[in-house]
Amino acid sequence: MASEDTTLEAVIEKSLEEENFDPRGLIRCRICRTPITHQQERIHIDGAHEHSFVNPHDIQFHLGCFHSAPGCSISGQPTPAFSWFQGYYWQYALCSECQEHVGWYYENANQDSFFGLILTKLEPSG
């Protein structure tokens, strides 16, 4: 009996393929190349896909908003403190493979959610 590939990368790619996403549109972690999300998951929040913010430590982040990011694990307790998106609580979004901080997961009281991913931490497949 042939063994099925159950690596994290294979599971994420299979999940995205089941959604009929072209594998060429995968967006990967820049550190370990694990698939994080897909170009087709791009969404607009507050009228734009991309946003630039500065955190309380004066560090600037350039984010892209995505409906889902199956290659991320979510870490930390939800908090509204210093949220860049009004009405949303945030948690850290980490690469599920190497645990690199790749952005944040946002959710509001209505359970609307999205990922704000740091674009410099990601790269397109190619």
Image (cartoon, grey):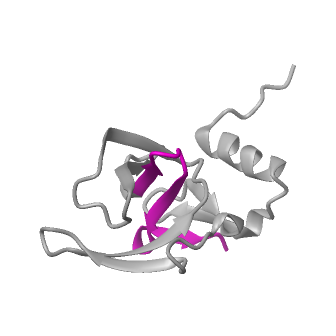
Residue 97 visible within the image: no
**Where in the figure is residue 63, as x and y percent of width and height?**
43, 73
User: What residue is at 60 percent from the left and 55 percent from the top?
Assistant: 35
* Residue 84 falls left or right of residue 118: left
**Where in the figure is residue 7, as x and y percent of width and height?**
62, 37
Name the residue nearer the viewer: 100 or 21. 21
Q: Quadrant of residue 6?
A: top right
The verdict on residue 124 being magenta is: yes
The verdict on residue 114 being magenta is: yes
| Magenta residues (range) | 104-126
**Where in the figure is residue 53, as x and y percent of width and height?**
30, 77
Figure quadrant of the C terminus: bottom right
User: What residue is at 82 percent from the left and 47 percent from the top?
Assistant: 18
**Where in the figure is residue 92, as x and y percent of width and height?**
35, 49
- The residue lying furthest to the top in this view is 1
Name the residue nearer the viewer: 115 or 24. 115
Name the residue nearer the viewer: 112 or 65. 112
* Residue 71 falls left or right of residue 106: right
